[in-house]
Structure formats: C-alpha cells, structure tokens
Image (cartoon, helix red, strand yellow):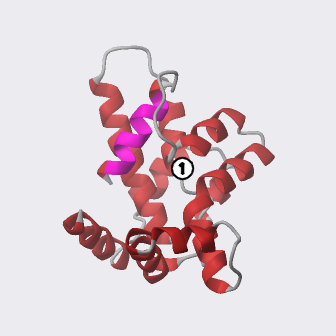
Amino acid sequence: MIKKRILQFFRAMTAHVSTEDAAYVETYLSSAVRPLFFAQSVPDQCHSLRVARHAEAIAKSEQGTLDIPFLVRCALLHDVGRKKGDLGTLGKSFAVLFARFCPALARDYGNGKRSGVLARKMNVYFHHAEMGADMLSNIGFLQEAKIVRKHHEAPTDDDPPELRILRIADEMS
C-alpha cells in the first residue's frame, strides 16, 4: 500500500496530458461533458485516463456484452467531483494520511462537524463521488452519474458490470 501511494505521489508530481491523451478524451467525451473532465487538476486527469485505459482493457478481455464506450466515459468522469484547486497533490496526500491515521477525526471534518479550510478539503476527499454525480446529473448524464456516485461504495450483488470494472481499474491506478 505504501509503495502504491508513493508511486501515485510521483505520478501526480510529474503529470501531464499528452496530445494523444486529449484525443482519447475527445473520442469518448462529448463537448457537453468535456469541461468537467478538464476542470480537474492535471494529476486527476492523468489518473482518470489511466483508470479509463485499464477499464477498457479489462472489458475487452471479458466475455459478455459490456458497453465499453459507456464504461470509458464513466472512468474518465469518476473523479470530476474533485476540481482543480480543491485538494491539490499535497492536500490529497495529507487527506489520505489523515483519513488513514485519524479516521474518526478526518470523518468529522469531512462530514461538517468541523469548519474551515481543512473541513472543506476533507469534504471533497470523502464526498467527491456524490459531488461529481450531481454535476453529471445537472447536465443530463444520468446513467454515468449513477456509476460515479457508487464508485467508492461497497460492492453489492446487483452492481452493473461497468461499476465492478471501474472499481477494479480505479484500484489499479
């Protein structure tokens, strides 16, 4: 787990979106939803691109009738609730450590039992899935919003296969 977090930190510090990455985004996201993707920080955009590519590869390797374009859209949009400036790389690193070592206190900050800058940042850390889903719903992406809203929730037997794959790809990235 520590090795994974260190790798995530260094990826975030060196993140950049290539022309190929931007073309991939344009292939799967319409102009109506693309601004939400690009409103994320560059490290979050790169994370979402990795998640999307992992999800696409997993889906192509499985038998069945998965809606791969829908899955890739969901993967690209799964963290849009964290906008540029909400956390930043250092803020997210702090939030991860705070939640790991002081979970009850971190939850108090994230759930409105405290106030201030730290409370706002922890709220985004804990609730970005719901925030992103609301943003997607507001522009008519209701099916994507359902998947995004649940991507950090515990799996259930009736989860759609796209949600299951998104969770796996997110954990890999």
Residues in magenta? 162-171
Q: Residue furthest top?
A: 64
The correct choice, above or below, for 116 with respect to 20 in the image is: below
Quarter of the figure with the C terminus: bottom left
Q: Nearer the viewer, residue 105 or 36?
A: 105
Q: Does the magenta run of residues contain 165?
A: yes
Magenta highlight: main SS = helix
Q: Position of residue 21 (x, y in %)?
A: 42, 56
Q: Position of residue 95 (x, y in %)?
A: 47, 74
User: From the viewer's perspective, is 8 left or right of 93?
Assistant: left
Query: Total of numbered circles in the picture?
Result: 1
Q: Residue furthest left?
A: 3
When asked about the image quadrant of residue 59, the answer is top left
Q: Residue furthest bottom?
A: 116
Q: Is residue 32 visible?
A: no
Q: Does the magenta run of residues contain 114?
A: no
Q: Position of residue 155 (x, y in %)?
A: 46, 34
The residue that label 1 is drawn on is 78
Q: Is residue 24 visible?
A: yes
Q: Residue at x 52, y 43 (%)?
A: 153
Q: Nearer the viewer, residue 18 or 37?
A: 37
Quarter of the figure with the N terminus: bottom left
Q: Position of residue 31 (x, y in %)?
A: 68, 49
The amino acid type, in three-letter code, at marker 1 is His
